[in-house]
């Protein structure tokens, strides 16, 4: 599902809301999650999962094409851990 499909589904299930308002709400939710992660905060949506940021240390990597050693800088990457309800649902629970 992509963002526009999510907005369409929410609009269909809530005919009393204008689609532009639903779009603004969805965009605000995503922006708040992004901002929280950028600050280093954890975002938990009960039953769905938790978003957090993990730090990957700098390391020496290898260029797969040439075999040459390259320095890989430290970086921060988003991490998602599923909630119990989501895991159970995916596994037929």
Image (spheres, rainbow, N blue to C red):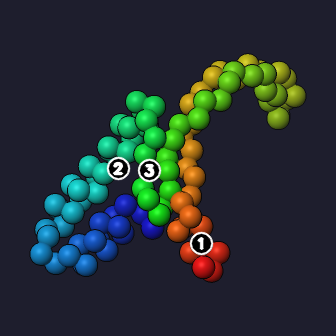
Indicate the quadrant containing the C terminus: top left, top right, bottom left or bottom right: bottom right
* Contact flag, marks 3 and 2 (Cβ < 8 Å): no
Q: Which residue is mark 3?
A: 44
Q: Quadrant of residue 57?
A: top right
Q: Using the image as rendered, state which of residue 30 and residue 69 is in the foreground.
A: 30
Question: Within 10 angstroms of label 3, few (less than 14), some, or many (20 or more) residues?
Answer: some
Question: Within 10 angstroms of label 1, few (less than 14), some, or many (20 or more) residues?
Answer: few
* Contact flag, marks 2 and 1 (Cβ < 8 Å): no
The mark that comes first in sequence, 2 or 1, is 2
Where residue 39 sits: x, y (%)?
40, 30
Where residue 16 sits: x, y (%)?
12, 75
Camera-side mark, 3 or 2: 3
Q: Which mark is residue 30?
A: 2
x 56%, y 75%: residue: 89
Mark 2 → mark 1, Cα distance in angstroms: 25 Å
**As displayed, is residue 93 above or below residue 65?**
below
Q: Which residue is mark 1?
A: 88
In the structure shown, which secondary structural element does the residue marked by tag 2 occupy?
A: helix
The mark that comes first in sequence, 3 or 2, is 2
Where residue 41 sits: x, y (%)?
43, 35
Camera-side mark, 2 or 1: 1
Q: Using the image as rendered, state which of residue 75 and residue 61 is in the foreground.
A: 75
Where residue 82 sits: x, y (%)?
56, 58
The mark that comes first in sequence, 1 or 3, is 3
Question: Within 10 angstroms of label 2, few (less than 14), some, or many (20 or more) residues?
Answer: few
């Amino acid at each position: 599902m992509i963002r526009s499909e999510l907005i369409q589904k929410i609009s269909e299930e809530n005919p009393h809301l204008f689609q532009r308002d639903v779009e603004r709400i969805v965009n605000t939710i995503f922006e708040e999650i992004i901002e929280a992660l950028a600050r280093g905060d954890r975002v938990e949506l009960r039953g769905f999962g938790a978003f957090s940021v993990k730090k990957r240390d700098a390391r020496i990597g290898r260029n797969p094409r040439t075999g040459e050693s390259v320095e890989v800088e430290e970086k921060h990457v988003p991490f998602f851990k599923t909630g119990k309800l989501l895991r159970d649902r995916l596994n037929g629970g």
